[in-house]
Amino acid sequence: MPGFSTFPLKRPRPSGWTLRKKTVFVLVLTLVGLLAALYMVSRQVLLRSYGEVEEQDTRQNLGRAVSALNDDLDTLGRAASDYSAWDQTYAFIHGGNPNFVKSEFPVETFLRLRVSLAVILDDSGRTIFEQGADLRHGVLAAVPSGLKQSLSLDSLLIPHSRANSTI
């Protein structure tokens, strides 16, 4: 037929990637990349920040614990110094005040000082008095059996080099 072309009026679309598919793919790939980068950056920042906050909190809590321990040691040191300087303690050590233990070491003393053991030694390291306390139940208790080995003059528990030293 004359005047008719053998070419079809519509060109068939090639199979594969069209411009629309390529655009969607590039947008999805860009979005996934941006989300991954955002995740990595925020994870690094947050982990570092949380690590710093946790370290600061730990340091603060450790400082509080050290301060509380120092306060307890100061209180205990003052009590030991007071007891060691009293005339009543001196008289008790030399046998002159048998009521000293009852008046000065009731269970309330152990509870107030938060100690579970009191020991009085003379200058030669001989034990004059020892008393334990159960702080949970608020009663006097026996002294641990292995304590005597730990109370020699060369022990780390008794570091006094002079009779009037405090440490």
Image (spheres, rainbow, N blue to C red):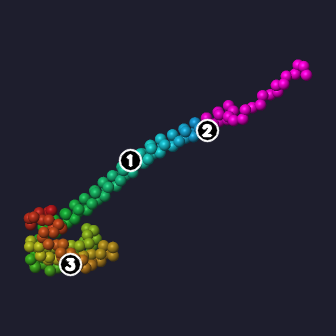
* Residue position for label 1: 52
Image vertical order of residue 86 relative to residue 21, above or below: below
Q: Is residue 106 above or below residue 44?
A: below
Q: Is residue 78 left or right of residue 66?
A: left
The magenta region covers: 1-26
Instruction: Indicate whether residue 2 is drawn in magenta.
Output: yes
At which x and y percent is residue 52?
38, 47
N-terminal label among 2 and 1: 2
| SS of the residue under disc 1 | helix
| Camera-nearest residue between 97 and 131 | 131
Choose between 69 and 8: the one closer to the eye: 8
What residue is drawn where x is 14% and y is 80%? 98
| Secondary element at tag 2 | helix
- What is the x, y in percent for residue 16? 69, 35
Seen in the picture, residue 68 relative to 151 is either above or below; the reply is above
Which residue matches tag 2? 28
Q: Quadrant of residue 28?
A: top right
Q: Is residue 112 left or right of residue 9?
A: left
Disc 2 and disc 1: Cα gap in Å? 36 Å
Type of amino acid at the residue the image marks with label 2: Val
Query: Which tag is nearer the camera, tag 2 or tag 1?
Result: 2
Q: Nearer the viewer, mark 3 or mark 2?
A: 2
- Amino acid marked by disc 1: Glu
> What is the three-letter code of the residue carrying label 3?
Lys
* Tag 3 residue: 102
Residue at image coords 51%, 43%: 39
Q: How far across and down, in percent of the image, does residue 117 sit? A: 23, 73
